[in-house]
Each structure stands twice: as structure tokens, then as C-alpha cells.
Amino acid sequence: MQTKLTDNDKRNFLEMMLRIRHFEEKVYQLYLTDKLFGMSPHLSIGQEAVPAGASKALRKDDYIVSTHMTCPH
């Protein structure tokens, strides 16, 4: 199924990606200044389009969660 994006859709995606980027930059700043405790945050900087695009397929009654998996070295 192919969906044509309107200019409004594109604007909404860009706004969402910028909101994600700014949030993650703030998380990282809080971590660097010892105001956020715990393990080092696993940021998705540069991958903001993934959750923005995935959100397009969500319905109001859907739930979504992001996970991180560490691979052993």
C-alpha cells in the first residue's frame, strides 16, 4: 500500500523529528551534567524518521514502546 504524503503530513513529520531530536539532546545534556541518573542514555539521534514514520500507521487505540538491545562483544 502506497500513501501519498501531503505537504501538511511532511510538515508534521519534520516537526515530530525535531521534537524528538530536541528531547534527546536535552536528555544527553542532563546526563552530562549529572542531573539524570542511571546508565548512559541510548539515543536515537540521526534516526528520528523511524518513530515519526511508524507513528503514521498507529491508530488511537494502539500502544508503542521503544526498546534497546545490547549485543555482547
Image (spheres, rainbow, N blue to C red):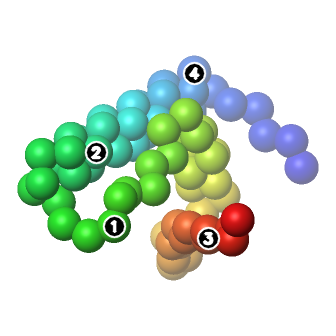
Q: Quadrant of residue 19?
A: top left
Neighbour class for label 1 at 10 Å: few (<14), some, many (≥20)? Answer: few
Residue 69: mark in rendering: 3
Check contact, mark 3 vs mark 4: CB within 8 A.
no
Q: Nearer the viewer, mark 1 or mark 2?
A: 1
- The residue labelled by disc 1 is 39
**Residue at image point 37% right, 57% down:** 41
Q: Give amino acid for label 4.
A: Asp
> Do we see residue 12 in this rendering?
no
Q: Give amino acid for label 3.
A: Met
Residue 28: mark in rendering: 2
Task: Classify residue 50 as left or right of residue 20.
Answer: right
First-in-chain label (3 vs 4): 4
Q: Nearer the viewer, mark 3 or mark 4?
A: 3
Q: Give amino acid for label 2.
A: Tyr
Q: Position of residue 63 (x, y in %)?
A: 51, 76
SS for callout 4: helix
Q: Quadrant of residue 22?
A: top left
Q: Nearer the viewer, mark 4 or mark 2?
A: 2
Check contact, mark 1 vs mark 2: CB within 8 A.
no
SS for callout 3: loop
Q: Position of residue 11 (x, y in %)?
A: 48, 25
**Residue at image point 26% right, 70% down:** 38
Q: Position of residue 10 (x, y in %)?
A: 57, 27
Distance from the alpha carbon under mark 4 to that under mark 2: 32 Å
* Front residue of this view, candidates 27 and 51: 27
Task: Classify residue 24 as left or right of residue 9.
Answer: left
Distance from the alpha carbon under mark 3 to that under mark 4: 35 Å
First-in-chain label (2 vs 3): 2
